Amino acid sequence: MSAAAASSASRESPPTVRTLAVAVLGTASNVGKSAVCVALCRLLHRAGVRVAPFKAQNLSNESVACTSGGEIGRAQAMQAAACGLTPCVEMNPVLLKPEANGSMEVVVLGRPLRRVHSSSSSASASSSTPDFSGSSLKKENSKTSWEKRFAVIREAYDRLASQFEVIVIEGAGSCAELNLMSTEVPNWPVVRHANAHVLLVGDVSRGGVFAQLLGTLALLPAVDRARVRGLLVNRFHGDPALFDEGVHLLQERSGGVPVLGVLSHLEGVCLGEEDELAVCTRCHCRHSATVMSPPSPSSAATQLHLLYIVVIRLPHLSNHADLCALEREEDVCVRYLDQPDWIGETAPPAPHCIVIPGTKDTLADLQWLHASGWARTLQQTAARCGATELVGICGGLQMLGEQLRPEEGDGPAVAGLSLLPGLCTVFRPHREKTVRLVAGQWLGAGPADPLRGLEVHGYEVHTGLSTTPSVNATESVLSPLIALHTDRGTPSHNTDGYVRTDRCHCWGTYMHGVWDSHTFRGAWLDRLRERAGWSPLDKRRRSLTAASDVQVAAEDLELDRFALHVASCCPLLLPSLFGSLLCSTTSLIDWHTEQA
């Protein structure tokens, strides 16, 4: 029996899970499935419904640590937050993390299991699943292998579904890839197992939305097409009423499948996109004058005293959502650059900060920094000891060091950027990856550091171990950056990251999400402003005296804002998908009215 037959059998077998499920499937990658799931989760949560997210398989280097020590895709963590839940590995049982040279790390139930090469399997497609059952890749399409892989996903879903009233399922890539229909796992096999209603999402901003939606419907087998309860036109720029004729044309040709809404673009919402297509074009600034061209002395960035933060767009960039909290700030312009042409004395103003973000392949991206000219630019910036601050996150911390080497016998040492002198990183590919939640107090460059003592929190996901040689403190320009707490929140003897104590403003940390703390982020940005000769931002300085959970409140407000936007643009969405469930509660209506 082939995988296609196994897939067909799963379609015909009666569902064993009774929890109400809705699957958000897409016509392609990066059409907005994750964001739509966030909105549905939030609206149901606000209605008092016990709801949880689920994505069988995610292809992304954007991961978040769970309290259990495992990791899942960032999109599912955001969806969990929308549900008022703590993320767990069942929400994303399979995570595929692309690496250099076509290889891929396979993470199952939060733990790294093995590496596969895309040339040996169909693992390169977001909706295809590599073999993680331990069987030979040559037998990947066998019935046994397909069933073992799907069993892991099915069991994770069942455990989750047993605890909630509704599961919001996110699909992967396109749900109508004909060459993968017989072997894919995260779309239709999950839909059939969950007996889920389907919402099909298309992206009008990229053009061809009629071909996207109608073409996808036409390619689906009749039994799967019958599960589609509605179409959603996403990312419409302008008044959605301008697309009224388009809605009529879609419904006229869709074979009775209704259009449940036209979702207009909402400016200023950062939900942490994890799709590579979104990251490749990412540039965020609230002031358009600084977006299309490099800032100049006469630009809005200078006139309005905007902080200019450059993020190096590494070839294997990961966890770019570390920067989302900075992008929300009104006085910050965050730009992702792949070339250093706009950096330096000949292109004023110089950035106030340059960030080397996380990476899935530190050594390959370090080599790229040298080849692209970034290494020289960073070293020249540090040598000037000017106002520009240099920051490395995770893999960025490793590259800022003096030396990187595999475990003994696994290869030669590689020279780092030497901007954190004496720091050596040893990679431990054969040992368990470090995946944990962390919190601590900022130590900074010494007692005079204005940020010293501020609380920071985040998570670590890495294989390298970075240390400095035991030397006299007076001989070293490095100092530990963060004093970590124990699991109980009490001080420990462990530290994270390093900072230079001389005139060079340079630090690095393994802590993803270090800027998520509202109090720390505001103080850090005001330090950049003072270094630039500007006054602290009064609005932010006042907010620093607010409650300690102000960041959580800000995230809640952003989730609510986006959910209300979806509900307003698509009034038919919830009644069509969850009508019978929501008829018994008025809490959503009351909440919607209160927010309005």
Image (tube, grey):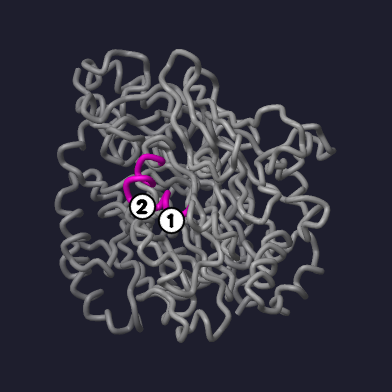
Give 578 or 106, whichever is nearer the viewer: 106
Left or right: where does residue 399 sit relative to residue 340?
A: right
Left or right: where does residue 567 sit relative to residue 234?
A: right
For mark 1, does the 10 Å Cα neighbourhood hold few (<14), some (14 to 19), or many (20 or more) residues? some
Magenta stretch mostly in which secondary structure? helix
For mark 2, does the 10 Å Cα neighbourhood hold few (<14), some (14 to 19), or many (20 or more) residues? few
- Asked if marks 2 and 1 touch (Cβ < 8 Å), the reply is yes
User: Residue 138 in magenta?
Assistant: no
For disc 1, the marked residue is 377
* Residue 244 drawn at (x, y percent): 27, 80
For disc 2, the marked residue is 373
Give 253 or 342, whichever is nearer the viewer: 342
| Mark 1: amino acid | Thr
Give 434 or 261, whichever is nearer the viewer: 434
* Residue 523 drawn at (x, y percent): 72, 64
Q: Which residues are magenta?
A: 366-378
Q: Quadrant of residue 3?
A: top left
| Secondary structure category for the residue under label 2 | loop
| Residue 584 visible in the displayed image | no
Q: Which mark is residue 258?
A: none
- Image position of 105 with respect to 229: above or below: above
* Residue 333 drawn at (x, y percent): 50, 71
User: Residue 371 in magenta?
Assistant: yes
Give 507 or 585, whichever is nearer the viewer: 507
Distance from disc 2 to disc 1, alpha carbons, whole Å, reads: 6 Å
